[in-house]
Image (spheres, rainbow, N blue to C red):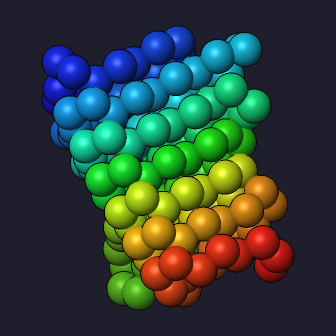
Amino acid sequence: FADPTAQLRGQVTLGDEVYVGPFATLVAEAGHKIEIGAESDVQDNVTLEATKGDIILGETVILAHGATVKGAAELGAHGVCPDAAAKHCPSFVGFNSEVDGATVEMDAMVGHLARLAPGVRLKSGLKVLPGKNVTTQ
């Protein structure tokens, strides 16, 4: 489902049972793409900007209200789940947070109002505290 007020421009692919909330903006330009895996949740006022690189969201990725993801970025596509038998587990990006050219593995969490800078990789099981600006590994 993509809310009628959401803007999807360029090469945007939505998996099964994906939710794109009101006033979300998904923009893929300059030959880049946005791929959103099954059962992912792109909430109200989220912005995905694939203008400098692709944005890949794996399965069960949750982007809370007002979050921003700038490409090249990958969220929930790789990593390990706490239950080794599970194929996928959620990744979470909190309210008004920013993932700017970074990687968030499965079972990782970016707290509210936090930021991941380009090149940072948030490994499975780790959390960024609310309001933190992570600029280096």
Q: Is residue 103 left or right of residue 48?
A: right
Residue displayed at 67% across by 40% down: 71
Q: Is residue 8 left or right of residue 70?
A: left
* Residue 107 seen anywhere in this rendered image of the structure: no
Q: How many marks on residues?
A: 0
Looking at the rendered image, the quarter that the C terminus falls into is: bottom right
* Residue 10 seen anywhere in this rendered image of the structure: yes
Q: Is residue 52 left or right of residue 22?
A: right
Q: Is residue 17 above or below residue 90?
A: above
Which percent across, then down, holds residue 21? 22, 37
Residue displayed at 17% across by 18% down: 4
Instruction: Name the one closer to the observer, 2 or 112.
Output: 112
Q: Is residue 64 left or right of residue 72?
A: left
Q: Which quadrant of the view contains residue 60? A: bottom left
Which percent across, then down, holds residue 10? 52, 12
Q: Which quadrant of the view contains residue 121? A: bottom right
Residue displayed at 17% across by 26% down: 3
Instruction: Name the one closer to the observer, 39 or 29.
Output: 29
Which percent across, then down, holds residue 131? 52, 78
Which percent across, then down, holds residue 102? 69, 58
Q: Which quadrant of the view contains residue 2? A: top left
Instruction: Name the one closer to the observer, 129 or 32.
Output: 129
Looking at the rendered image, the quarter that the N terminus falls into is: top left
Residue displayed at 45% across by 28% down: 26
Q: Is residue 52 above or below residue 74?
A: above
